[in-house]
Amino acid sequence: MSELNTTQAPPAILFVDDEATAVKYFQRAIGQLAPVVTGGSVEEGKALLDAHAGSLAVLVSDQRMPGEYGNELLRYARERYPHIVRILTTAYSELDQTVEAVNQGQIHRYIKKPWDITALRMELKQALELAGLRKERDQLLREKLSVLQKQTVATRVGMVQALCASLIGPGRFQPVETYLAGTSLAGARNAEPDWQRLDYADLVGAESQRSGTFGHAVGTRLAELRGRLTGKGAADAVAVLAETLGDGAVRRDGDTVTWLAPAALGEFVGNPVGEAVSAGHADWLAVLLWIEEAGGALRLQREGDAISARAGVRTETFASDRLAVWIEQLSD
């Protein structure tokens, strides 16, 4: 088994064949096109893929080798490293297995031995070009997804502010600040859509429905709290929080409330598109709005793996770019 020099800049070709003569022949024929790393069995090929997949552009595997067949190696590469262009080669007429490999998307080309050197070089040149195009496409796709993911987070953060303004009036940013602080402490960062299932129109529709449902739940719960908590005020903030969220979600210890599952604080901003927001999460934002109307505030902090809340001091003014700061932080 020959190892790949990871300091080499050009993308490499992995050739797997148990015949030493074929390995030497391949290296002599293809070595000028790209670096060639070789293995003598399916297991060696898998090990090289796992070690150097980021530097490999093309995989060429013989079919008949001791132990497993080459199409097993190609299947392994397809499942784990789909960016690598896969080619099957064999001196035998194993039509059934070749057809199976083609149908399962395991191979890009089938090349029969003995090789025509001119044709082999052309095939490998085209495979390297295809690998380069795939790399460019994947990079563009990652950049596009990064932008769309950030837009999704920004839309959700903006929705929280708009919802708070609509329910308790504009200019009251304290509950938004506390809510987003909880989202950040919970580690919520990834709202990346499943682009295998959604296009942009689907995303907009799913997000609109999700936000509307969440907003309605928060508004309904806030109305219930207003009716039920008549006569209570900011001094009751911790007790109201513990009572509203319930023993299954939080634990109260004196003037401290601790979340039993801190990740729940990041549901609306961080969960995948189309995943409904729980009633308990709507309760959390509704409590923050009620506390704001009562003239109080909560202070959140992470203590090890836990997130706790205590009564805090309201901040009267916030910087005009505060929402943008949160969007940037939650999009990282």
Image (cartoon, helix red, strand yellow):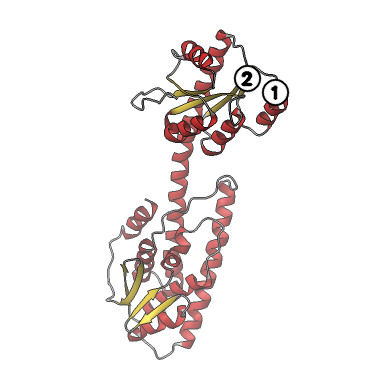
Q: Is residue 31 left or right of residue 306?
A: right
Q: Give the spatial CA distance, label 1 vs label 2.
A: 8 Å
Q: Which residue is mark 2?
A: 90
Specify the quadrant that holds the N terminus. Answer: top left
Q: Amino acid at mark 2?
A: Thr
Position in image of residue 294 (x %, y %): 36, 82
The answer to whether residue 186 of the structure is visible from this angle is yes
Q: Which residue is mark 1?
A: 94
Front in this rendered view, residue 161 or 88: 88
> Are there few (<14), some (14-19), or many (20+) residues within 10 Å of tag 1?
few
Front in this rendered view, residue 180 or 301: 301
Name the disc covering residue 79, or none: none
Q: Which residue: 60% across, 47% down?
A: 197
Position in image of residue 210 (x %, y %): 55, 62
Position in image of residue 109 (x %, y %): 61, 22
Front in this rendered view, residue 144 or 161: 144
Q: Is residue 89 left or right of residue 230?
A: right
Position in image of residue 183 (x %, y %): 39, 63
Q: Is residue 224 left or right of residue 67?
A: left
SS of the residue under disc 1: loop
Q: Amino acid at mark 1?
A: Glu
Q: Where 34 sits versus 236, above or below?
A: above
Residue at the far bottom: name it.
231
Front in this rendered view, residue 241 or 124: 124
Residue at the far right: name it.
96
> Are there few (<14), some (14-19), or many (20+) residues within 10 Å of tag 2?
many
Mark 1 in CB contact with mark 2 (< 8 angstroms): yes
Q: Which residue: 72% across, 24% down?
A: 95
Q: Quadrant of residue 206?
A: bottom right
